[in-house]
Image (cartoon, rainbow, N blue to C red):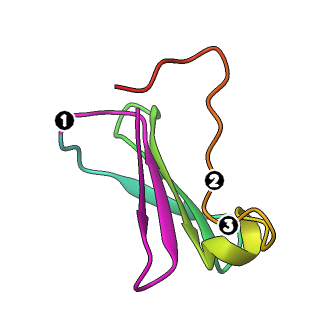
Amino acid sequence: MKISYDETVDALYIRFVDEPRQVITQRLTEDIAINYGPDGEVVGIEVLSAREHVFKKEDGLKVVLENLQAA
């Protein structure tokens, strides 16, 4: 799994599959989308306006891993 954040556009992407895949995108809201592979597997989740939806203003850009090791 890879989590990336682009501060210039305030977008967060969580990628579950390492290799490139053709995807079908399903928008849950204007700012949140899920990318599915042809087999229905979740490839990634995109969150636009991440500071509003993911990161609390008082915490800043903080990510806590529980029961996982950072590579």
Whether residue 2 is in magenta: the answer is yes
Tag shown at residue 62: 2
Give the amino acid type for the residue marked by disc 2 in the picture: Lys
Could you say whether the residue bearing mark 3 is in a helix, strand or loop? loop
Left-right relation of 7 to 65: left
Q: Is residue 56 above or below residue 49?
A: above
Question: Where does residue 47 sit, x and y in percent of width and height?
Answer: 58, 66
> What's the residue at 45%, 31% (across, down)?
41
Question: Where does residue 27 sit, x and y in percent of width and height?
Answer: 60, 67
Q: In this view, does 20 lie above or below 10?
A: above
Query: Which residue in the structure is indicated by mark 3?
Result: 60
Q: Which of marks 3 and 1 is in front?
A: 3
Give the amino acid type for the residue marked by disc 1 in the picture: Glu
Tag shown at residue 30: none
Closest to the observer: 31 or 56? 56
Residue range in magenta is 1-19
Q: Mark 3 vs mark 1: which is more N-terminal?
A: 1
Query: Which residue in the structure is indicated by mark 1?
Result: 19
